[in-house]
Amino acid sequence: MNLALKDTLHAPARFALTTLGVAFLVMAVIGMIGLYRGIVEDALLIIDRIDADLWVVQGERAGPFAEGSAVAADMDRRVEGVPGVADVRRFTQFSQQFSFAGAPRRATVTGVDVPRDNGRWLSLAEGRWLGGSRYEAVADASTGLKVDDRIQLARDVYTVVGLTRRMVDSAGDGLLFVGINDAAVIARRRTSEEIHLARAAGTGAGVVSADASSVAQDSKISAVLVRLDPAADTARVIATLQRWGDVRVMTTGEQRDLMLNARLWKLRLQILTFTGMILVITAIVVSLIVYTMTIEKLHVIALLKLMGARESVVVRLIGQQAALIGIAGYALAVALAWMIFPFFPRRVVMLPPDLAQIALALALVCAAAAWVGITRASRVEAREVLS
Amino acid sequence: MSGAPVLSVRSLTRHYATGAGLVRALDGVSLDVAAGELVGIFGPSGSGKSTFLMLAGLLENPTSGEVWLAGERVSHAGADLDALREIRRKRIGFVFQKANLIPFLSAVENVALGLEIADVTPADARVHGRRLLAALDLAHRADSLPAKLSGGEQQRVAVARALANAPPLILADEPTAALDRVRGRQVMEIFRRIAATRGAAVVVITHDPRSTNLFDRIVHFEDGRVCERPQIY
C-alpha cells in the first residue's frame, strides 16, 4: 500500500491547503518569469517583426527606442538610392494620450509608411489594414478601441479600421498604427495660442496652418527602415550610409541589444532578482512543510522501524509525500496561471521551456526537502515507539 | 515448559550512565521461553521489565550478555541494531500498552502493513489481515480507522498486527493497562489462545494480577534481576 497517499487522503483539507500554498508560490515564480518574458517580447515586438535589415536613425544617437531620433522626412529617398537597398519605409513612434468615451486612454502612435508598408509583418484580429486614405487607424485591442470607433487625435478624427492583438510597446501601451503623414500631423499638434503667435510673427510666407509646428520640424520621422537585396554586402551599405555623417545605421541585432541591455536592463535585473528571491522562499517553505510533516510522523516512522520496515519504506513515505506536494502544487500553479494571468495588465508569457525549468527547480526543491526529512527520519529509533 | 526455547537470554545486562552514577537497569538476567509458552513478567516500576523487553525485542543492545532466538545468537553488546530489523520483522511481534495503530490506515491495513513490509503482495496481505481480524471478532471493524474503534478493539487490532507474520515470539508490554477488567481479560485470553494454538512463545510484561491464572509461568523482576519469590504484585 502507498503510505504517502494514504496519509495524504486521510487529511485532504490540509493537503489541499498545503498544495494551494505551494501553488501560489510556484505561480508567483511562473508569473515573474512570464512577466519578464512578456516585457522582453513586447519590447522586441516591432524590432523583430517589422522585417527590416537596417535602421537608419539620427546621427550620433541610438534611436528610435533607446533614444529619441529624428531624421529628415525625405531621408527615405536618399537611402533608397544606395546600391544594395531593396526597399525603404519611413517609421515613427511616440506616446499619445487621447480621450475616448469620456475616459483618458494611452496608446503608442506608430507611423507606418503606407502603402509601401502593407502590414505584412503583423496579423490583424479584425477589420483591415490601413488603406491609402488619411485619418484611418489600426488599433491594438488593449487600447480598448474597436473597429469603426472614431477617436480624435490632434485636431482630426480617425476611424479605427482594424484591430491587432498583443501589439504593445515596451511600456505595455497598445500600438495605434496610422499612416506616416498622419503620425507627423499628430506629432505636430499645437495650441491655438501657438498658431496665433506663429501667424503674428509671420513674414508673409503664407498662411500658417494648424499642422505647421511652432518649433523646428525639419525632421519628422524617427527612422528609415531598410531591406537589403539578398546579394547586398551589408557592411558596405552601412559604410556608405554612415559616410553621410548625419545618420547612424543600426542592424536589427544592435536594436535588440540596445533595447534589452540599455533600456530594459534595470527592469530585467529587478525582475530576475525577484524571481530568484521567490524561488528561495519557495525552497524554504516547501522544505519546512516536508520537514514538519516528517516531524509529525516520527511516531509512525518509529513504529515502522519497530515492525522491521526497511529504510526504503520510510524513504518512500517521505519522498512520495514531498513529490505529491510538488506535483499537485505545480499542476495547480500552472492551471491557476492559465486562468488568472490573461487578466493581468501586462502580458505574462508562459513558455514550455520556462515551465519545464520551473518544474525541474521545484523537483530539486522537493528532493532537497525530502532529503532533509529523510535525514531526520533516519535518526528515529524503533524504541521511540515506547516513549 | 514445552519444546525448545524460542527466546533465550543469557546474563543480560544493561547499564546506563547518568549524572547520579551508573544505573543497573538490568543486571545479569537469564531466561528461556519455549514455543507455546505464555510467560508473565511481573515487577514494580523500575524493576527492569521494560528494559528486558527492549533487549529481548532487539530494540537496544545489552551492555553485556546475549539474546538468542531459536538457537541463533542475534544480539549482544556490539550488535548492529539496524541489521536486526529483518529479525524483528520475521520473528517478533510486539503489542504495547497503547495500540500504536497508524491513524491513517484502516484496521485491516494496519494488520496487512506488517505483511507488506515482509514482501507479501497487497492483496494476499489484506486477505490474511481480514482473516486475523475475523479470528479476533473484528471482521465487522476491518475497514474502520483506529479513531473509530474502542480501546479494546484497537488493542485487538494491535494483537492481530503482531500475529500477521506468524512470528514465533510475541512480546507484550502492559497490553491490558489501558483496558477495563473485561476487555483486559479478553486480551489475555487471546494471548493464551495464541500460545496454545499457534505455538508462539508469548512474553507479557504486566502489573495486572487479574489474569495470572492464564500464564504458564510467572517471572518476577526486582532491581534489574529475576527474583525467585513466587509472590506476584
Image (cartoon, helix red, strand yellow):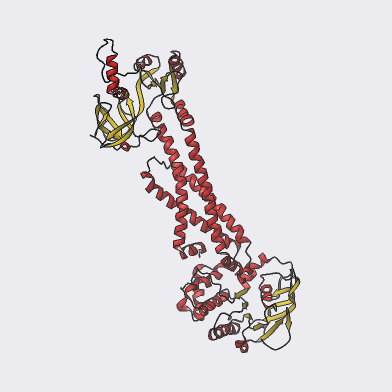
x and y percent of residue A125 in the render? 29, 36
Q: Quadrant of the C terminus of chain A?
A: bottom right
Say which residue appears at 68% left-offset and 66% top-offset. B81
**Residue B112 vertical placement versus A29 (above, below):** below
x and y percent of residue A62 in the render? 45, 23
Quarter of the figure with residue A103: top left
Say which residue appears at 61% left-offset and 83% top-offset. B195
Quarter of the figure with residue A190: top left
Q: Residue furthest top?
A: A204
Apparent side of residue A49 relative to residue B127 in the rendered image (left or right): left
| B197 or A297: nearer the viewer | A297
Apparent side of residue A281 relative to residue B195 in the rendered image (left or right): left
| A208 or A290: nearer the viewer | A208
x and y percent of residue A330 in the render? 46, 51
**Residue A269 vertical placement versus A54 (above, below):** below
Apparent side of residue A145 relative to residue B166 in the rendered image (left or right): left
Quarter of the figure with residue A61: top left
| B207 or B211: nearer the viewer | B207
Apparent side of residue A27 relative to residue B169 in the rendered image (left or right): left
Total labels: the figure holds 0
| A318 or B148: nearer the viewer | B148
x and y percent of residue B213 in the render? 62, 89
**Residue A126 vertical placement versus B208 (above, below):** above
